Image: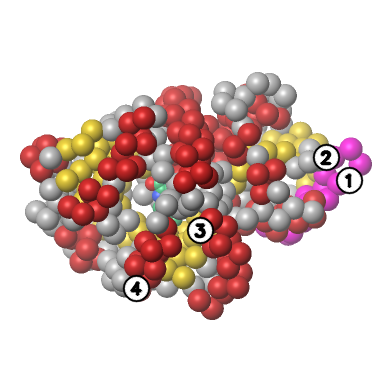
Amino acid sequence: MSASPSSPSPMAADVAVIGSGIVGLSTAHHLLDRGLSCVLIDAKGPAGETSFGNAGSISVGNVMPQSTPGIVTKALRMLANPLAPLKLDWGVSPSYARWLLQFLNQGRLQHVLPIIDALGAINTASRSAWLELGERIHASELIAHTGYLHVYSEEATFAKGEWERGLMRERGVVFDVLDAAQLRDLEPGIGSGFRRAVFQRESLAMRDPGAFCRRLFDDLVARGATSLIARVSGVARQGGGYRIDTDLGPVHAGRVVVAAGAWSNALLRPFGLKIPVIPARGYHLMYPQAQTVVRRPTLWAERYMVVSPMQEGIRMTSIKELTALGRDPHYALIRRLDPEARTLFPGIAGEPVSEWAGNRPCTPDSLPIIDRVPGEDVFVATGHGHLGLTQGPVTGKLLDQMMAGEATEIPLAPYALARFG
Ligand SMILES: Cc1cc2nc3c(=O)[nH]c(=O)nc-3n(C[C@H](O)[C@H](O)[C@H](O)COP(=O)(O)OP(=O)(O)OC[C@H]3O[C@@H](n4cnc5c(N)ncnc54)[C@H](O)[C@@H]3O)c2cc1C
């Protein structure tokens, strides 16, 4: 069932899920399984924002946070290099200055080790959650068992990575270190300057994140969820539940899930919460289809650039631009990486056919927030940053278990609101 501007409001449901990205849709999937009625509210419809244009890597083995020891020097070097991924939108720097300090502080070793464990726990649980979801909605063909490849153009960067690889080995994270010949066997189209690689063979690859979200959305609607394509302006207690004000009228629900990605903060403010989630904007360029160029998502470690084979073509993603919501994208940042994409995979032919920008919802500690607002029947699932595609389905499962008062598949303490004080 879908509401249009002409259909009468108010709507009512057991749960209102705000945000139809991979996180909100996955949550609704589990809530429906419990027999709860859901209304899915999104200003843009399914995967209208960040869940559409990501690199498609279900990166089970990516357990390192964004901030690690030495981050200050690393960040300063990146800011001085026009081809490096880190960019600051200086015009709005006061809006993320505090977040940036928290982020740099999280890079200290005593913080990093527990964060790695918490990323490891949620990423490990993500793999089966993805495979189960794919089967349930008959979309398994969009999930490829290709693994995820990290390649290096500089020996020094690869050598420095040994510290990370040691921590990953200690924790049983599965990966293989490849020499030049093994790399070429796996990706025959890789550029000649790449001689070192780390292969996460348990990672999966999503061939079209936008199409998967739309399939999931269609499945939810077929199972009885109501969809409202509308912007939420506020959430307030009313009677025994909540009134969600939208530009198409109010919706009433017993419980509310805020899964609005980088936009979640505004919706939580009425409950006295301010979560440290800022948009770190990333971009993509799409190239025409060429089946043989690249077989799996491949990250160029020095550039933080990923080239991925998608159903519709080859996708190159990069850039982490700290910014504020509503700022115009700077597409020049991704366009100037076009020659770099062809260095990584010289077989990329033709001009880019489209470009895109999306806001990663980033916390300072690189961990998501999966929790209940104290004293309310309002639940939060956001802050998945660079790994929201990976962690979306398992987040839905975990939040549903929390909402049902059940023991959760993994302990949720590392993802609690309370960690921000
Ligand atoms: C370039 C790039 C590459 C990436 N690559 C990967 C990758 O390879 N692997 C990986 O795991 N992750 C990746 N990510 C991260 C991942 O895409 C995100 O973490 C994830 O999509 C976040 O999902 P979400 O559902 O929380 O948010 P979103 O997909 O942004 O969904 C939030 C939704 O809330 C809606 N909304 C917001 N406010 C309101 C409101 N007031 N009223 C109504 N609706 C509202 C929006 O319209 C939106 O649809 C990448 C991100 C980028 C930018």
* Discs 2/3, front: 3
Dot 2: what SS? loop
Point 71% across, 56% down: residue: 274
Q: Is residue 236 magenta?
A: yes
Give the vertical position of 249 relative to 114 (above or below): below
Dot 1: what SS? strand
Point 41% across, 39% down: residue: 63
Give the vertical position of 19 relative to 402 (above or below): below
Find residue 375 and name its label.
2
Point 23% across, 49% down: residue: 158
Q: CA distance from mark 4 to mark 1?
A: 52 Å
| Residue type (three-letter) at the residue carrying disc 3 | Leu
Residue under label 3, please give it: 104
> Tag 2: Cα neighbours inside 10 Å, few (<14), some, or many (≥20)?
few
Dot 3: what SS? helix
Residue under label 1, please give it: 238
Q: CA distance from mark 3 to mark 1?
A: 41 Å
> Tag 3: Cα neighbours inside 10 Å, few (<14), some, or many (≥20)?
some
Q: Is residue 209 visible?
A: no
Give the vertical position of 344 relative to 400 (above or below): below
For marks 1 and 2 on the same chain, the one whose residue lies earlier in the sequence: 1
* Residue 75, percent from left and from top: 40, 64
| Residue type (three-letter) at the residue carrying disc 1 | Gln
| Residue type (three-letter) at the residue carrying disc 4 | Ala
Is 296 placed left or right of 407 in the picture? left
Residue under label 4, please give it: 80
For marks 2 and 3 on the same chain, the one whose residue lies earlier in the sequence: 3
